Every structure is written in structure tokens, then in C-alpha cells.
Amino acid sequence: MVGRVLRTALFLVSACAIWAIVLPERTATAQTSRGAAQLKVGGAVATPLTLSVADLKAMPRTTLHVENPHEKKSEVYEGVLLEELLRRAGAAHGEQIRGPLMTTYVVAEASDGYRALFALAEVDSGFMNSEILVADTVDGSPIDEKRGPFRLVAPHDKRPARWVRMLKLITVSSPKELN
Ligand SMILES: Nc1nc2c(c(=O)[nH]1)N[C@H]1C(S)=C(S)[C@@H](COP(=O)(O)O)O[C@H]1N2
Ligand SMILES: [Mo]
């Protein structure tokens, strides 16, 4: 009887010890991949950017309270406005967006190859209040790997089809066919 209790106790202690070793390792791996994640802003911009989660944390932050049109629940996203990132990359903004720049567009691409397009004017708060956000937290937590670590949120779209999950690349272009 005593032997059985002892054996059970020993088993429990060793099981805990294994988890004490494995768990921090798993957490560290998750943090490493999140820390290494990069978002690139390029194409027709003066200063292409490569940004980490930490870089976004150091920029002016915006909080959005949204009704996720798909899941029909309210969510709070936090991150940096897409227009802020484009401005830092040297893209035209405000009154500069006129003439030929009215056909300039921004493509957001994810690591699964999914893409969505916005007109440059549409992203600019001098033109309209689209509040398009590059989010890195949802409801106060980092966005999980199926959706993050970066996710685009276009809160005024009626469907979330442009809420690009796993966002990795933002490219500014102009349609060649119009030159
Ligand atoms: N990377 C990526 N982002 C994506 C998609 C996708 O297939 N891949 N689907 C879009 C569509 S059509 C919808 S409805 C929403 C679903 O987002 P949810 O999983 O948060 O509901 O993600 C959008 N973003
Ligand atoms: Mo969708």
C-alpha cells in the first residue's frame, strides 16, 4: 500500500519535472518565431521597410473597437495604421495623392499567398476615414499564428475578406496598363 502511494507520488513528481523542462522551451520557441516575424513594406516607395513586432510597438498606436462581420462578435484590435507605415516608407499621402497617384494601389499579401488590394487614396485619412489597421493584438493578446502576428483590419468593410491574416508583405504599385 505504502509502496503504491510512493510509486504514484514519484510518477507525479517526475511528470511535473518533465513539464517544467518542456513547457518553457515550447514557450520560448513560440516567442522566437513571433520575435523573428517580419512585415515588409515595399514596391514604389522611397524607403522600403522591414518591421518586427517590436518595431510596431514603438510607433504611434491605434485601438479599434470593431464588430467582426464574420464572427458577429465585438473585438478590440490594436496596432499601427496602414497609412502610418506607408508614410514612413515614403509613400505619397494627404494632398500629394492627386493626378496619376489616384490609380496607385496597395496590395497586402499573407504567408499563405492570400492577397487583398486597396487604393492608396482609400488608405489615407486625408481622403476618407477607412481606419485600415495593421494589428498585432486582439482583445489585449498577441494574434495567434493562424491569424498573426500581423493582421490587417478594414473595419468599415461589410465583409472581412480584406482582413488579411498572417500579413507579411505590403506592396505599393501603379497599373502599368495606364502608362
Ligand atoms: N491570409 C488570409 N487571410 C484571410 C483569408 C485567407 O484565406 N487567408 N480569408 C479572408 C476571409 S474571406 C475572411 S471571411 C476572413 C476570416 O477571418 P476570421 O478567421 O478571423 O473569421 O479572413 C480573411 N483573411
Ligand atoms: Mo470570407
Image (cartoon, helix red, strand yellow):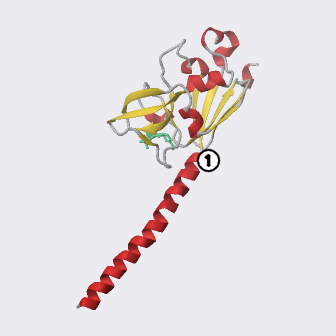
Question: Residue 178 is drawn in which quadrant?
Answer: top right
- The residue beneath circle 1 is 36
Look at the image and tell me whether residue 112 can be seen. no
The quarter of the picture where the N terminus appears is bottom left
Residue 130 x %, y %:
48, 21
Q: Nearer the viewer, residue 54 or 154?
A: 54
Residue at the spot 39% in from the left edge and 71% down from the top edge:
16
Residue at the spot 76% in from the left edge and 19% down from the top edge:
179
Q: Nearer the viewer, residue 18 or 164?
A: 18
Q: Nearer the viewer, residue 164 or 30?
A: 30
Residue 138 x %, y %:
42, 38
Give the residue type at disc 1.
Answer: Ala
Q: Is residue 168 left or right of residue 7?
A: right
Callout 1 secondary element: helix
Q: Which residue sits furthest right? A: 179
Residue 121 x %, y %:
58, 17
Mark 1 vs ligand 1: CB below 8 Å:
no
Residue 103 x %, y %:
65, 18
Question: Residue 141 is drawn in which quadrant?
Answer: top left
* Dot 1 crowding, Cα within 10 Å, few <14, some 14–19, many 20+: few
